[in-house]
Structures are given as structure tokens and as C-alpha cells.
Amino acid sequence: MSHGFFTIISRAEFETLLKDFPPLEAQTVPLSQAAGRVLADGLTPAHDWPLTNRSCMDGYAVNARDVFGAGESNPGYLECTAHLSINEMPDMTIPPGECARIATGGVLPEGTDAVVMIEHTQEMDGTTVEIRKSVAPGENVMQRGEDAREGRTALPAGTVIRPQEIGLAAALGYDELSLFRRPRVGILSTGDELIEVHETPVPGQVRDVNTHTVAALVEAAGGVPTPYGIVKDDLESLSQALDRAIDENDLVLLSGGSSIGVRDLTVQAVETMEGSEILAHGVALSPGKPTILGRAKGKPVMGLPGQVTSALVVMHVLVLPLVRHMQGDAAAFDPTRRCLRKAELARNVPSKPGREDYVRIRLEEQSGQPPLAHPVLGKSGLLRTMIQAQGLAPIPADSEGLYEGQLIDVWII
Amino acid sequence: MSHGFFTIISRAEFETLLKDFPPLEAQTVPLSQAAGRVLADGLTPAHDWPLTNRSCMDGYAVNARDVFGAGESNPGYLECTAHLSINEMPDMTIPPGECARIATGGVLPEGTDAVVMIEHTQEMDGTTVEIRKSVAPGENVMQRGEDAREGRTALPAGTVIRPQEIGLAAALGYDELSLFRRPRVGILSTGDELIEVHETPVPGQVRDVNTHTVAALVEAAGGVPTPYGIVKDDLESLSQALDRAIDENDLVLLSGGSSIGVRDLTVQAVETMEGSEILAHGVALSPGKPTILGRAKGKPVMGLPGQVTSALVVMHVLVLPLVRHMQGDAAAFDPTRRCLRKAELARNVPSKPGREDYVRIRLEEQSGQPPLAHPVLGKSGLLRTMIQAQGLAPIPADSEGLYEGQLIDVWII
């Protein structure tokens, strides 16, 4: 009888295998759907932005030399000879000793190089304006080309598009962008004990949890999840379902199959595909050890642990970075990209050296201090620890544990 | 001439006004669309979960008393009289001296209370199994009801639904949930200098940036953005557009209008609505001061600063928490809910007391140390500072600044 031992590789080695899969191809996407995605082609604008020198303030466009030394006790006086409308290109030149009323965003006329805020001025009789503050050349002015220059890369390929990048693209006239495609992710559940959520379990049966948690995570990472439902625990059913899922997706996740028998079946099903290969069979991660990585038809296939919490941890640590990597995010596996909070560990947490542990952490806020990090212990077949936790504390493989009072990085999930 | 001065309130006072708007009503939502949203009605399951005592491991279900004291040098021996299939309720009782082969997830039969991992056993001749490790009662067993108990609240109203909560709901048989409705957010842009993204600006014109950044942010916070495009800078056009947007949405954001004239117009347009009220006209926030809050037809209306970076900061600090609050998230305004990273400030940052400053921060990772936080200075009418920054560093209103070398919390955005 086989005990199903397998060679365990480190999390770093597993990541290296994942990074070998190339990003997907580029596609054109409307700007309104670009958030969170990654630029496949850099933006090189056809004009400067701002297009002209523009005022940052409501006030008076002046030549800075004319108001040199002006102050509350020593105001300067200028003739206001123009009121500029915000949406016009001024066609006059402002001579020395004169100024122009300007609104925020207005274009500075020739002869002016700075703006005095209206709060530091006073209209006098007729057209005279009292200036009670000096300004340096360029003060309160957005300079032509400060945000982007004609012909120079404003956002390079590989940029992750946040709302501010959407703003810059809009400013430069891009109403669509060339982005890496979002991976389609097929999700299969195996396990003869599984039933659908709407069914009522008899003792021995459990509802399919992993399909739903995995789909929600894939979507949050920018993937497009396609659940294929529950597949019967036999090689033919699993091979058929896998074959179809691989054809229809860029990445396939097999969930369920926590027992050795089902794990073996997953491996066999991958191996039935032509030209397929098992790349990893186990990772030194706790929870999450029985994770499988294969390649079939050139695409990654991952067997997740069947235990619900193990599957969640493997999704966070390995699968979601892969989903980001496939959509062109070069820093997808960079741990500094995680949302990390410093917290003070509330008690000792021992760890077995040789594997990386991800301890579930409940945070207790403390006024004026880092939050207290309480480890939430419990079985990885239950969801309780993940429900009670706000984050995960990684314990490196070369460590024997963490100590009470230690400041640790908690990865908020 | 009016200089447009207005009474400034603090960020905390502004938040109090925002929190006065009630959450939206509940609606029934499929489980697959629940992620990130908030439970309006708690989940009280009709049965325990797990439904029965289940094995966490592949191994042998035993009575812990039978293997007391067993070890590598002192193994115990039990007769294996049953092989349990994972999806069946065992109908036998295991007598003392016997054990049952069990798979991960399998139901423990009567007479057993623990599981010995298969790695710590050896099959002998016939049905005898050598047990090389003792187990405590309950060891390697998920107990009935450990995750949820029949008739007791498993997830209270107000819970933010993460993938793990989706998993628990699935386990308990909920394929839809009662969640607070997502706010529909109308977005209006004003400014006669604005043109659409696909248009080509002449000097003096700028493309509408805020509609696009604001819509992306609203969507990320769980709102449903509806852009109404560019509205002309006159009271009648703005009032009409506002009236329609208020009828069709739960929250209306007016963007653009950075100049005092347009701000006045926003206020006037809100005031033309029957029963409307201006609740705040300015907030002690930098950037972001010229922010307006009104109520019309019982709904919040906010006038955002026209400057692109000011609008982004106000969205993060005030509007997105409101969008979360309206969908029932009681901790929406809690700053500890932000993704905060400790970083070491690279240089002094002075700040004007009396207002809360949000300094844009570029992080430089340092091996084994907190990252260095470089302030990115620049005009709030430009996007450059937000493009270069990974986060914001809040400087409290009672502070005169932050010092080089100080450890600060950077809010990753």
C-alpha cells in the first residue's frame, strides 16, 4: 500500500515554477474597465500635459518681478487690464505693471509667470489691485508638460492601473488602453462527499465550499472564474472535466481532494493529458502542503488542498500572485506588495523548521500602539480560524517560531 | 466682490455629518456576488457545521484509550475491522481493541474519538495495524458544530463578506444572502473648460479627468457609478442635471468646479432643490479644502474640489468611507481599516497646524528594515504626485509636521 509520500519543494521554488508561465496577450479595453489591470503597451502622449501653463488658484496672473518684495505692510499695486475666462487661450500680452484676473485652471497670458492668490489681494477703486504677497516665478502655476511630455513615455508597459493612472490616461486622450488579458480560471471540485450548496446534507456529506471561496478570490485578483461544479471521484470523469476546463481557460484549479486517494487521482488526471507534466507535488507550506502544480496543453493546472483553510492559504500565497502574474504584473509575487501591518504578538507561536507557516491572526487595536496580534489556532478543515482572523503571519521556514512581544508583519487578507 | 470665504469644519466633524446618512435597505444577492458587501441579516444555521465529527487526516479512527502510551519504540496493535468511505455515515460501532480506516473528511464511527495519521501507522499481516503514536481524545478530529451551531448566529448582521465568509455561508446552505444594497453614485462634471476624453483640446481646454478617476474609485469601494458627463457651468443646466442625478442615485458627486465661481454655482444648484440644505462648505483638509456637503431629497450631495489630486484625496478620505457606510459597513470610517504600512520618513515635512494634511509618499524598500518614505511634493492640479506615490501620510491637524527618521503610518492607496 502506498502512503502517498511525495517530494516537497519550498515556497520559493514553487513560485519560480509559477513565474515560468508567461503573461497572457494584450487586448484593448475601455478606460472604464481598466482599473487594477496592467498596461501591455506604454502610453506616449501626442501632446504635453498640461498643454499650457495654467493657474493653480483663483487670483491674478502677474509678472513675478512686478510684485517682488510685496507684503502686508508693503503692498504693491498693479493695473488689472484683463479678466480671463477659464476656457479661452488669452490672446493678449500683459505688459509690466499690469496683471490679469485668472481662475483656477486658466491659461497664463504672455508676460505673466506667476499667480497671486485672491486671498492676498484687494480690489481698489477702478482697475487697481493691491498685492499683499510676493510670488516667485512659477508660483501657483502648473507648468506645461509637468505631468507628461509629448513623445516621452508617460506610463510604461507593466504599470498597474490605479484611479490616478486612469486620470492621466483620460487627460492624455486615451479612452481605451492596451492591457494584458485577464486570465480565465476554471474551477473544478472533486470529492464524492460533496453536494451543491442548495442541497441538504445527510451525515457524511458536505456542501462544496471551495468552489465559492476560490471563485471569490480569483475575481478579487482580477481573474475571470468559471466554476465547473462537482466532478465525480473517478479518473474518467475527472480527466474529461479537466480536458474541457483546460481548453476553455488559461488556468485550471482543482479543489477538494484532501485525501491521498483523490490527490493521486488529480495527478493521474493531469498525466492523462497529452504532453502534460507534473511540476510539483507538495510544497513546504503549512497549511497547504498537498498542493500540486502541473502543466497541460501549456497551461498551469493546480491541485489545491481539500481542507478549506488550507485551500484559502494556498490561494493567497501562490494562486492569486499567479493570477496577477498572468495579467502582466511583474511584482505579483513581491511580498512587499501585500497589505502588511506591524503588530505585537500576544504570545509565543512555535513552528516546525523546514516549512513556512501562515498563522491566522486576530488583531486587537491598542490606542497609540501597534495592535496586538492574537494567533487563532484550529484545524485547517474548519473555517473558524479564517473567519476570526484579520490576517496571516508568515513564519519563515528557517525559524522555530515567533515570540510574545515580537513586532511582526501581519498580512491583512 | 465676494472672495468666497466659507466656514471650515474639521475632518472629524465632516465625518460625523456623513455618518448621519443611514445605510441603504437590504436586498437578496446570489452568493457569487456577495464578496466585499455587508450582511443585512445575520446567518443562523438550521444545522451544526460540521454536521458530525469528521477526520482531519487520512488514517485510523481509534478510541484514544486504546493507543495510550503508544510510540515508535512501544507500538500498539489494533484490529482494523472497517474501511470507511468518505461520503457515508458509518452504521457500525467500533469496539475496544479495534479501529477503522478513515479518509480526510470521513465521519468518525461510534466508539472512536480520535484519528491516528497514516504516517504513524503500519499495516501488518491481515487486519492488524501497528500504531506508533498516541493520540488525545479529539485529536485530528473536527468536532460537530465547531464552525457553527444550529440556531446560534454564525455571522452577525454587519459582517463584511470575505471569501471565508462566503465559504461558511456555502457550508451552511445559503446560496443567497441578505445584504445592504450597493449605493448608486451619480457623477457630474462641471467646468466650461472641460472636454470629453475622445476630443482634442485647444489651449485652454482640458479633458475631463475627475469623472474617470471618481468612477473607478466608487466602483472599487463597492458603489455603482453612473457618469452623467460634462454639465455646462450655468445654474439652470447644473440644477437640471443635479435634479435628475439625485432622482436616479443614492449619492451624487459633483466634480470639477475648482474655481470659486463654480463652487458657488454648486452650492446654489443644491439650494434650488426643495428641502435641500448645505451641511458643510469646506473642510480642514489639505489637499481638499473646497469640499461641499449638501442634502437634497434626503440624499447626500458632495461637491468635490476640481483639482485632480485634491479630488482623489477627498475621495479616499471622505467619499469612499461614505460609500462603504451606505452599504452597511459600520467601521467604514475607522482609520485602522486602512491598509497601513510603517515606514521611515526620508526628510522633514512641515505642515500648517489647524488642518489635516495628506502628503503623497513614495516608498523605497530597504532590506530588513521598514521602507523609506519619500514625500512627493507638487501641485494638486497635477496627477504627477499621485502617480509617483504608493500611499498617503496623514499629518494630524494639531501637528506642525513630521520629522526625518520618524516612523510613520503610510496609507497604501
Image (cartoon, coloured by chain):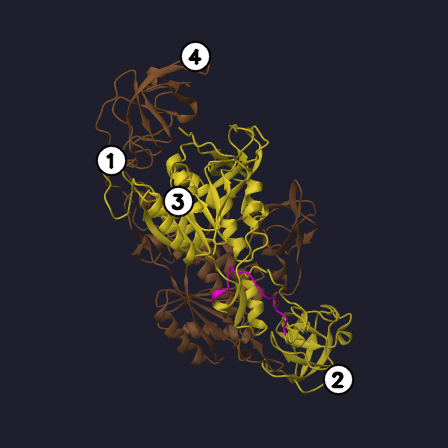
Chain colours: A yellow, B brown
Label 1's element?
loop
Of the numbered discs in the image, which one, if any, rests on residue B74? Answer: 4
Q: Earlier in the sequence, mark 1 or mark 2?
A: 2
- How crowded pointer 4 is (Cα within 10 Å; few <14, some 14-19, many 20+) is rated as few
Q: Are marks 3 and 2 on the same chain?
A: yes
Residue occupying image coordinates x 69% and y 45%? B405
Q: Are marks 4 and 2 on the same chain?
A: no
Q: Which residues are magenta?
A: A33-45
In the visual, does B229 lie left or right of B25?
right
Q: Is label 1 or label 4 in front? A: 4
Instruction: State the residue in front, A240 or B301.
Output: A240
Residue that lies at the very extreme toward the bottom in this rendered image: A91
Q: Earlier in the sequence, mark 3 or mark 1?
A: 1
Can residue A141 be seen in this snapshot?
A: yes
Q: Which residue is mark 2?
A: A95
User: What is the spatial separation of the Cα atoms under label 1 and label 4, in whole angstroms?
Assistant: 36 Å
Q: Are marks 3 and 1 on the same chain?
A: yes
User: What is the spatial separation of the Cα atoms under label 1 and label 2, in whole angstroms?
Assistant: 90 Å
Three-letter amino acid code of the residue under disc 4: Asn
Can residue B10 be seen in this snapshot?
A: no
Label 2's element?
loop
In the visual, does B344 lie left or right of B108?
right
Three-letter amino acid code of the residue under disc 1: Pro
Residue B251 is drawn in which quadrant? Answer: bottom left
Q: Which residue is mark 1?
A: A203
Q: Quadrant of the N terminus of chain A?
A: top left
| Chain letter of the residue carrying label 4 | B
Q: Is label 3 or label 1 in front? A: 3
